[in-house]
């Protein structure tokens, strides 16, 4: 397993779309580093031949009937939008 | 039980309502008055809507007058953790990210409570996005433990537990991902139940870790928890992880199931780190079950020590995905300083999320990232299989497992806040239950010398909540811890 010091906080924060202050980076590096050191004990476990568990009691192929249902009305869907216009959410320009 | 209305259990109040000795409006007014009297100290509520609560109470009285009362919950104020959606009410997850969010729809459990006639009462404080074990991570306020206001109520459903303990609600709903119902129940001296994964719909619950989250009830008594569970359990087409399990009449089954049972004591749960008073109270409970004729067997859950590590890989991975939706675009906080579309994400999330949420998103992103996924996330999923197997093997020998809920009684505010890892380890007895998808209940089993509640956890078999509740009730019937209330 990788060493805890492999944590590239800038890279991971970028993936997570989180802007961190220098103070946060320093603090989190230590705190998350401590957690990763603790987690490293999982390496002791013999997991050969063990299947991973994504859900304790898994369900498969849970189908819904393909019947149209009314969704949220537009006004309700936009109730919490930070900015809106013409029944659409207004955002800064994405494409130049 | 106390003579004050706000300290009586659902079952007693339901009888009084049915006999027209009290009205729902009177009950709601008593709860409101109590809340106004003590919440300045307890700080359990993020907000409450007095007019709406009284309107619900009047509607209940009208139903009853027309002979159309819905059952034992009709007219009962049930506090709601501010992470479960109630249409038209705030839904903040105790986060700046959702400080102004108003729910456009009801959660399935909300709709079921409304169908049962219950009053959906207030928005109860929690650790931000349900991440924490003390409610100190709330972006808005710190809830105090009603038994000692300098101490935490536990978390993340601290508001739900504290409000009930303080008489500010007759019952409440919380959510539990790693112990967030059971641990605050223990620290606040009330009953808290996490159902089997899949028993209760997660539709309308703000998602933290989708394979671990469950909504569950807090009550003054085991019977109250049974009534609440009966109201909210059941398959939901809107939650594809919900099971088509048969829902018994949990309350009726309590009277029928008397044991005796085979109860397991896992040696790994009593090895080290337990406060001596907690250990003494739990040992006394074990002795009581033996006196009732139960067989007590030592069992082993060998992978216990890995549970916290596994959880902080899986839960953080799942939350990093679930919290990606908070991007400042469709709802929630949008930064005013953003320069372009991408910058909206970075700045809105930086401004909207607190430190613990950011830490968990970063950890979760890391363990899922390219080059690290196999070593962390995949390995954790395999160890999860082993943890689950430990429990299922134990259930070949025993009906249920007895443990302390929390290694210590309520700790002082600030004591663990600076050390995330120390905070994580306070969930050491509850976390494996979520990983294995099992039901678990915490009920009061004593007090420390300084008057702090101690909780006993009983872990049950999947979808056997009726047995779990009966085993809990058997203990409760011989003790009166649940009749004690804090002085505020």
Image (cartoon, rainbow, N blue to C red):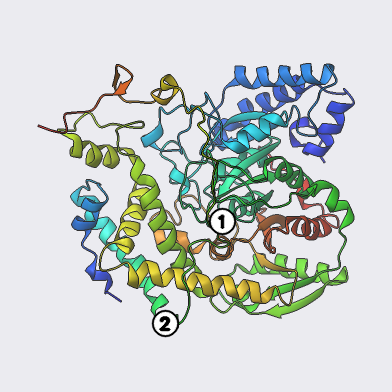
Residue at 54% x, 55% y is: B411
Tag 1 near tag 2, CB within 8 Å: no
Label 1 resides on the chain identified as: B
Measure the alpha-carbon separation of dots 1 and 2. Answer: 25 Å
Query: Looking at the rendering, in which quadrant would you find the N terminus of chain B?
Result: top right
Residue at 54% x, 65% y is: B428
Residue B144 image position (x, y, % from top left): 55, 42
Say above or below: B114 vs B225: above
Residue at 9% x, 32% y is: A96
Residue B93 image position (x, y, % from top left): 46, 39
Q: Which residue is mark 1?
A: B179
State the residue lying farthest toward the left. A96
Packing grade of label 1 (10 A; few <14, some 14-19, many >=20) is many
Position of B228 compared to B178: left or right? Answer: right
Q: Is residue B419 visible?
A: no
| Element class at badge 2 | helix
Residue B401, by quadrant, is: bottom right
Position of B310 compared to B40: left or right? Answer: left
Residue A82, by quadrant, is: top left
Query: Looking at the rendering, in which quadrant would you find the C terminus of chain B?
Result: top right
Label 2 resides on the chain identified as: A
Q: Which residue is mark 2?
A: A44
Say above or below: B462 vs B326: below
Residue at 67% x, 29% y is: B114
Q: Nearer the viewer, mark 1 or mark 2?
A: 2
Say above or below: B140 vs B458: above
Q: Is residue B105 visible?
A: yes
């Amino acid at each position: 397993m990788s060493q805890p010091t492999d944590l590239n906080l800038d890279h991971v924060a970028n993936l997570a779309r989180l802007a961190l202050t220098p103070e946060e980076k320093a603090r989190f590096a230590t705190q998350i580093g401590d957690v990763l050191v603790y987690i490293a004990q999982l390496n002791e476990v013999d997991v050969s031949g063990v299947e991973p568990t994504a859900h304790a009691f898994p369900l498969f192929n849970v189908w819904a009937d393909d019947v149209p249902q009314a969704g949220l009305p537009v006004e309700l869907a936009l109730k919490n939008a930070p900015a809106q216009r013409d029944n659409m959410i207004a955002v800064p320009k994405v494409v130049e | 039980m106390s003579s004050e209305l706000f300290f009586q259990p659902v079952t007693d109040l339901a009888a009084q309502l049915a006999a027209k000795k009290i009205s729902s409006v009177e009950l709601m007014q008593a709860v409101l008055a109590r809340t106004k009297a003590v919440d300045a100290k307890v700080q359990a509520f993020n907000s409450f809507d007095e007019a709406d609560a009284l309107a619900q109470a009047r509607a209940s009285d009208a139903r009853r007058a027309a002979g159309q009362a819905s059952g034992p919950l009709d007219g009962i104020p049930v506090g709601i953790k501010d992470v479960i959606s109630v249409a038209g009410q705030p839904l903040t997850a105790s986060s700046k990210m959702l400080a102004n969010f108003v729910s456009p729809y009801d959660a399935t459990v909300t709709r079921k409570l409304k169908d049962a006639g219950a009053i959906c009462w207030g928005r109860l404080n929690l650790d931000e996005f349900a991440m924490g074990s003390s409610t100190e991570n709330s972006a808005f306020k710190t809830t105090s433990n009603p038994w000692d206001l300098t101490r935490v109520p536990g978390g993340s459903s601290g508001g739900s537990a504290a409000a009930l303990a303080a008489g500010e609600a007759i019952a409440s709903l919380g959510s539990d991902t790693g112990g967030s119902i059971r641990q605050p129940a223990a620290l606040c001296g009330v009953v808290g139940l996490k159902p089997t994964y899949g028993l209760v719909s997660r539709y309308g619950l703000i998602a933290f870790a989708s394979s671990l989250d469950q909504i569950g009830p807090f009550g003054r008594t085991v019977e109250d928890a049974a009534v609440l569970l009966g109201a909210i359990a059941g398959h939901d087409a809107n939650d594809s992880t919900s099971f088509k399990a048969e829902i018994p009449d949990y309350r009726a089954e309590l009277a029928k199931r008397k044991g005796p049972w085979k109860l397991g004591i896992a040696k790994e749960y009593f090895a080290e780190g337990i406060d001596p008073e907690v250990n003494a109270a739990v040992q006394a409970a074990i002795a009581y079950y033996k006196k009732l004729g139960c067989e007590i067997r030592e069992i082993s859950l060998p992978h216990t020590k890995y549970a916290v590590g596994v959880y902080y890989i899986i839960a953080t991975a799942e939350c990093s995905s679930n919290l990606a939706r908070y991007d400042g675009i469709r709802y929630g906080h949008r930064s005013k300083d953003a320069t372009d579309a991408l910058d909206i994400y970075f700045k809105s999330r930086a401004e909207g999320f607190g430190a613990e949420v950011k830490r968990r998103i970063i950890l979760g992103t890391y363990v899922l990232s390219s080059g690290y996924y196999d070593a962390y996330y995949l390995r954790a999923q395999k160890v999860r299989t082993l943890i689950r197997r430990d429990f299922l093997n134990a259930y070949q020998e025993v009906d249920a497992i007895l443990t302390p809920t929390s290694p210590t009684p309520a700790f002082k505010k600030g004591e663990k806040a600076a050390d995330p890892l120390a905070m994580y380890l306070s969930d050491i007895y509850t976390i494996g239950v979520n990983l294995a998808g099992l039901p678990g209940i915490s009920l009061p089993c004593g007090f420390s010398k300084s008057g702090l509640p101690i909780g006993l956890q009983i872990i049950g078999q999947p979808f056997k909540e009726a047995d779990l509740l009966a085993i809990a009730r058997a203990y409760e019937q011989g003790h009166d811890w649940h009749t004690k209330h804090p002085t505020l």
